[in-house]
Image (spheres, helix red, strand yellow):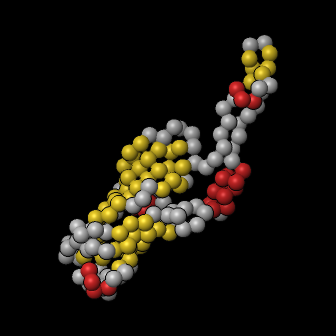
Amino acid sequence: MKRILYFMLSALGFSACSDIENGDKKSDDWQDIPCMYGTPTTEFVVKGKVTDSAGVPIKGIVISSKGINSFDDGSGLSAVTVDDGSFVTNTTKEFGVGGTLVFTDTDGEANGGDFATLEVDIAKLPKSQTKEGDGAWNMGGYEVTADVKLEKK
């Protein structure tokens, strides 16, 4: 149901145009009235660190997302952990901070073990606001922290 509503909002947009009183006369110039069209957006980035159950950083873990992009066109978040297990995703503009992060070991034993895939609900992760929104369509910017431990298969 949410996806249908999101699609309808973005397809139809939003317009708040009507006559306004201008002293004794009405203005027919619709350009004097603020109009909005588009999709509510939130800019966010996910950062964190991936370790094994003993706390050892894991290099080469692929971080992807599901359900981030409302239209599910595959343009969600992506990153790969570096030597110290840290990662930072690309910035994405979406309806809100939600969806699922997927941590996948794609190289098996090469990174110290064959780790099981882990899925984490982004809504349950700590976040902090990094940029104020404009109070209308732009909801601001957020940084989400995802420090996770992977278990060996």
The reply, left or right, for residue 24 in relation to residue 6 is: right
Rendered residue at 63%/56% (across/down): 6
Rendered residue at 80%/15% (across/down): 25
| Vertical position of residue 153 compared to residue 50: above or below | below
Residue 81 location, quadrant: bottom left
Q: Residue 124, position in %: x, y?
A: 40, 61
Rendered residue at 78%/22% (across/down): 27
Q: Residue 18, position in %: x, y?
A: 76, 31
| Vertical position of residue 124 compared to residue 20: above or below | below
Q: Can residue 142 be seen in this view?
A: yes
The answer to which of 96 and 60 lies nearer the viewer is 60
The reply, left or right, for residue 63 in relation to residue 15 is: left
Q: Residue 112, position in %: x, y?
A: 23, 82
Q: Is residue 121 visible?
A: no
The answer to which of 63 and 145 lies nearer the viewer is 63
Rendered residue at 66%/43% (across/down): 37
Counting the numbered discs, the total is 0
The reply, left or right, for residue 37 in relation to residue 49 is: right
| Vertical position of residue 58 compared to residue 69: above or below | below
Quadrant assignment for the N terminus: bottom right
Quadrant assignment for the C terminus: bottom left
Residue at the top extreme of this rendering: 24
